Image (cartoon, rainbow, N blue to C red):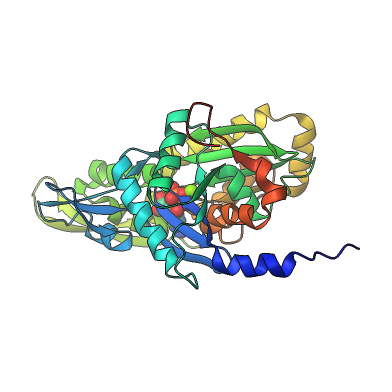
Amino acid sequence: MAIDVFRPLRWLLGLFSLDIGIDLGTANTLVNVRNKGIVLNEPSWVAIQKKTKEVVAVGQQAKEIAGRTPSNIIAIRPLRDGVISEFEITEAMLEYFIGKAHEHSLVPIPSPRVVIGIPSGVTEVEKRAVYDAALAAGAREVYLIEEPTAAALGAGLPIGEPRGSMIVDIGGGTTEVAVFSMGGIVLSRSLRVAGDEMDQDIVAYARNKYNLLIGERMAEKAKIAIGSAYPLWEEKTFTLRGRNLVTGLPESVEVSSIEIREALSNSVNVVVAAIKDAIDETPPEIIADLMEIGICMAGGGSLLQGLTERLTEELKIRVWLADDPMTCVARGAGRILEDYDILKPLLVGLERGSTAR
Ligand code: ADP
Ligand code: MG
């Protein structure tokens, strides 16, 4: 067996360089620092001064003030539907998060190497935007990886092997479905129905059924507390608070998990249909593999109660939840730099004519 004489050297170098994997999600951004793990996990929110565009808060703090901001401040999510819609604000957010990750390195290294996830099927311009934002935020080198690939790596799926595997990543803005074999994506689907849409479903339900106007954050709380995709062992209730649209006065309404399930059913059905569609197009050999290892789910939306049961029943294939599903993309992105020589084929390039490699 060959002895790796460079190993101690690489270890030493590792102490002085900063490698980070970033999951720039529509809902949450996670930063994974090599040898440290996930050092940051915060909502992708930024609060800015309306006039000067000066950033007043980022992450958790910004999300908390959303919907309650004074008129001169607005809280925004710079990513919508998985892609950057507000370039400068995304850049400011990344800069802040990368800066925070720096606090975890032994010596003040100015610029890290960064692997960052992008949704599958985004345009060249959208890819460039992520790449440029990371560079502008202070990265020395930037590599891009498709989020489903990073999620599958983070979930420990055997994507480098000839046998097939499948991941469903339900985030805030998008649901991504991808089938892998031999280290490549055989087919993928990306749809703009995910966690945010489910929150909107609950807002609409409360308005239509109870004339109750509730905020998105209240809707999200109800979804996380009692939302489901399959009948629960014990149905529960939740108190929605908002404003009655008829009287204009504050009001509380107690809703049951059965009602919330009904509210969410449209979005859940769309997600189920998209996965069925993908399975329809999957080559039969790979279907046989899936019947063995099942379909893996990742992303915050996959935590919706009863979703794995519902999918397993409808798809006739076992559907399981990855370990720690909300950190899969960040963990997978981080793994690339650990095993760069082996894993680099998984990275995606930018087209010629751009400044990227
Ligand atoms: P993104 O990759 O877009 O940033 P995440 O993977 O972080 O998204 O997932 C965020 C979404 O997951 C949000 O819509 C959030 O409401 C939803 N979510 C988080 N926890 C739960 C839960 N326990 N049940 C249902 N949805 C959840
Ligand atoms: Mg995500």
Horizontally, is 141 left or right of 206 in the view?
right
Q: Nearer the viewer, residue 151 or 337?
A: 337
Q: Residue furthest right?
A: 1
> Residue 334 vs residue 205: left or right?
right
| Image position of 82 with respect to 63: above or below | above
Camera-side residue of 109 and 60: 109
Give x and y (percent) for residue 142.
Answer: 51, 46
Residue at screen point 28% across, 46% down: 203
The answer to whether 225 is drawn above or below residue 75 in the figure is below
Q: Can you give x and y, in whole percent of width and height, for residue 335 in the image?
A: 63, 56
In front of the other: 247 or 322: 322
State the image coordinates of residue 56 (x, y, percent, origin top left): 21, 58
Q: Which of the 4 image quadrants contains residue 15?
A: bottom right
Left or right placement of residue 187 versus residue 218 in this view = right
Is the C terminus in the top left, top right, bottom left or bottom right quadrant? top right
Is residue 54 something that shows in the picture?
A: yes
The answer to whether residue 128 is left or right of residue 80 is right
At a point 55% along the width and 33% down the height, the residue shown is: 189
* Residue occupying the point 14% across, 48% down: 52
Which of 124 and 80 lies nearest the eye of the viewer?
A: 124
Q: Is residue 62 above or below residue 211?
A: below
Please say whether residue 44 is visible from this viewpoint. Answer: no
